[in-house]
Image (cartoon, rainbow, N blue to C red):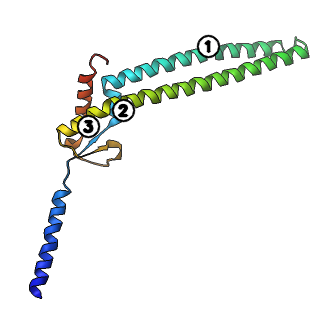
């Protein structure tokens, strides 16, 4: 009976040891935001988005300036003009303000759609490159750096991925 107990304990320890060996998969992590901000392709995407946003802002600022001038004109002439004309001017002004708000919301919505599309396309283009890197370097699991509390610097493959993207998209960046 004592021999069976020893064998049983040995048997259990033997399998635990194999489980520990099998659990040692190669793991790495990647800061995808850093890749997006510092790769040539990511910088190009951000530059495109910034130019679209600046164009939208300048267009809105021009319209806002016109609306402010009309408001000032109404305030200056409210004591001089008739009540009916003043009400008509205020009504037109309020319509212009509503149109401005609608246009602003539409531009913001369109910008968000463009941004989402460009970022999704970036991920579609970069994902195969990351998968190839994982295969070549026998990496089993890849985590996003945002979800890692602490880890060895040697497990961070962010700069390697940036180099691969910059080489692949050198002419596009």
Nearest-to-viewer mark from 2 and 1: 2
Q: Secondary structure at mark 3?
A: helix
Give the residue at mark 1: 62
Compute the Cα span from label 1 to label 3: 47 Å
Asked whether 49 or 110 is in front, the reply is 110
Choose top left, top right, bottom left or bottom right for residue 139.
top left
Q: Position of residue 68 (x, y in %)?
A: 70, 16
Asked whether 136 or 53 is in front, the reply is 136
Q: Choose the circle earlier in sequence order: 3 or 2.
A: 2
Location of the C terminus by quadrant is top left
Compute the Cα span from label 3 to label 2: 12 Å
User: How many residues crowd around disc 1 within 10 Å: few (fewer than 14), some, or many (20 or more)?
Assistant: few
Q: Secondary structure at mark 2?
A: helix
Give the residue at mark 3: 131
Q: Measuring 37% from the left and 28% from the top, which residue is drawn there? A: 122
Q: Secondary structure at mark 1?
A: helix
Q: Position of residue 97 (x, y in %)?
A: 71, 21
Q: Measuring 79% from the left and 15% from the top, which residue is drawn there? A: 74
* CB-based contact (under 8 Å), mark 1 and mark 3: no
Q: Measuring 41% from the left and 29% from the top, which residue is drawn there? A: 119
* Above or below 28: residue 87: above
Q: Choose the circle earlier in sequence order: 2 or 1.
A: 1
User: How many residues crowd around disc 2 within 10 Å: few (fewer than 14), some, or many (20 or more)?
Assistant: some
Give the residue at mark 2: 123
Q: Measuring 11% from the left and 78% from the top, which residue is drawn there? A: 7
* CB-based contact (under 8 Å), mark 3 and mark 2: no
Nearest-to-viewer mark from 1 and 3: 3
């Amino acid at each position: 009976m004592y021999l069976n107990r020893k064998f049983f304990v040995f048997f259990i320890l033997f399998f635990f040891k194999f489980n520990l060996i099998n659990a040692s998969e190669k793991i790495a992590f990647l800061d995808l935001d850093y890749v997006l901000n510092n790769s040539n392709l990511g910088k190009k995407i951000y530059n495109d988005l910034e130019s679209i946003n600046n164009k939208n802002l300048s267009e809105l600022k021009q319209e806002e300036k016109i609306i402010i001038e009309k408001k000032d004109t109404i305030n200056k002439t409210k004591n001089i003009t008739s009540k009916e004309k003043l009400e008509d001017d205020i009504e037109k002004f309020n319509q212009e303000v509503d149109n401005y708000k609608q246009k602003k919301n539409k531009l913001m919505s369109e910008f968000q759609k463009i941004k989402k599309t460009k970022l999704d396309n970036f991920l579609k283009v970069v994902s195969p490159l990351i998968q190839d890197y994982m295969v070549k370097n026998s990496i089993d699991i890849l985590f996003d750096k945002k979800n890692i509390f602490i880890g060895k610097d040697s497990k961070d493959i962010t700069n390697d991925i940036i180099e691969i993207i910059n080489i692949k998209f050198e002419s596009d960046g």
